[in-house]
Amino acid sequence: MGLAIPDDRTPTSPRAIEARWFALPRAIKEKLAHLEARKDMLHGACETLRHRVLALRAELSEKTQRLKHALANASPETRVGVTGSDPWTGGSGSGVATYGGLPGPERQQEIDRLAEQLGRLDVLYRAAQERWQSAARIYQSCHEWLEGAELATLVPVVVKYEHLTDPRGEVEALRALLAALAEDAAAVERAPIPTAEALQRLDALARDVAARVEARRRERARAFLTLGGVRGVGGLYGLVEGFAEHARELAEKMVERCEEDFLAEQKAWRNAVQAQTIPGEPVAATERPKRLAELARKRHDLEQREEALVLSAEAAGLDLDRRGDADPAIVLCTVLADAAA
């Protein structure tokens, strides 16, 4: 008989933490472990390359300094004729011994070789560092998403293994489509509204402003019915002694004046709106959420397909990097059929 475990998204007690962990689907726990292992593996490779780069850089620096010192302290080259004999065989001979002079060209060649190796290793190290950072971001985002996800939503999406002729090319093609979808979504988000809708907004604002102006006018008109009446325009508009001692009072009067000018210039405002050049395709406010929802659905399907291709490539022995900004829910819940069994 199974235990009924309440869905505590952020358990704090040891019992609740362990109960939530054991309630997670096995395929998702294995997927998270795989992502963590891959992150640690790439980190190990990255650290190995880093130590090699540091050691090679130190060796190159040391030998460069030694060559500079040898060049700075080189003595003139001296050649001396010498003769000698071998006491065992009785043979004799002569030759020329050379003292001093500049270091041989092989020392500079060694430095050039080390510099070439350092440049090659540095490129490999930077590439490994990017791969590790991407894998670390993926694991961290999946771990954080899993901690806050409802247990009822953690349903593995099982995909079948596919034999891919060019898995890397197919993944890159999908990522190009994802990038295009992101551009489309950004274009929809910043797209202007149609002119007709803009004029409707202008009319709505004019109605609101007119209502406020009329309400103020009615309030001030009561002063004409009082015993003292209105003796000046300043009193009618509140411009009495002590006015504008606070910046808020001056700001309120400026807003009132701007609202009255706005109402008086309605025709000019309408003409200005109609004369605007609309960049790109306008999108109505009511249509915008629908467009974005459709693009999000397409993106979800493409990302799920992308993860399925990555899993099939891994099963075939080809390690493909995931995008650092991939959806953690899709990455974590998409599993191969064998892994879900």
Image (cartoon, rainbow, N blue to C red):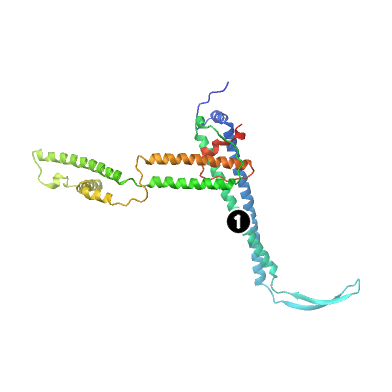
Neighbours of disc 1 within 10 Å: few (<14), some (14-19), many (20+): some
**Residue sitting at 32 percent across and 45 percent down?**
194
Left or right: where 126 falls relative to 203:
right
Q: Position of residue 340 (x, y in %)?
A: 60, 33
Residue drawn at x 65%, y 56% is 55
Indicate the amino acid at tag 1.
Asp
Q: Looking at the picture, does residue 75 appear above or below residue 202?
A: below
The front one of 250 and 336 is: 336
Q: Which residue is mark 1?
A: 122
Q: Position of residue 230 (x, y in %)?
A: 10, 43
Element class at badge 1: helix
In the picture, measured across the screen, residue 148 lies left or right of residue 81, that is left
- Image coordinates of residue 46 in percent, x first then y, are 61, 49
Q: Which one is in front, 163 or 251?
A: 163
Residue furthest left as drawn: 227
Q: Is residue 206 left or right of residue 316?
A: left
Q: Looking at the image, is 155 positioned above or below residue 285?
A: above
Q: Is residue 71 above or below residue 229?
A: below
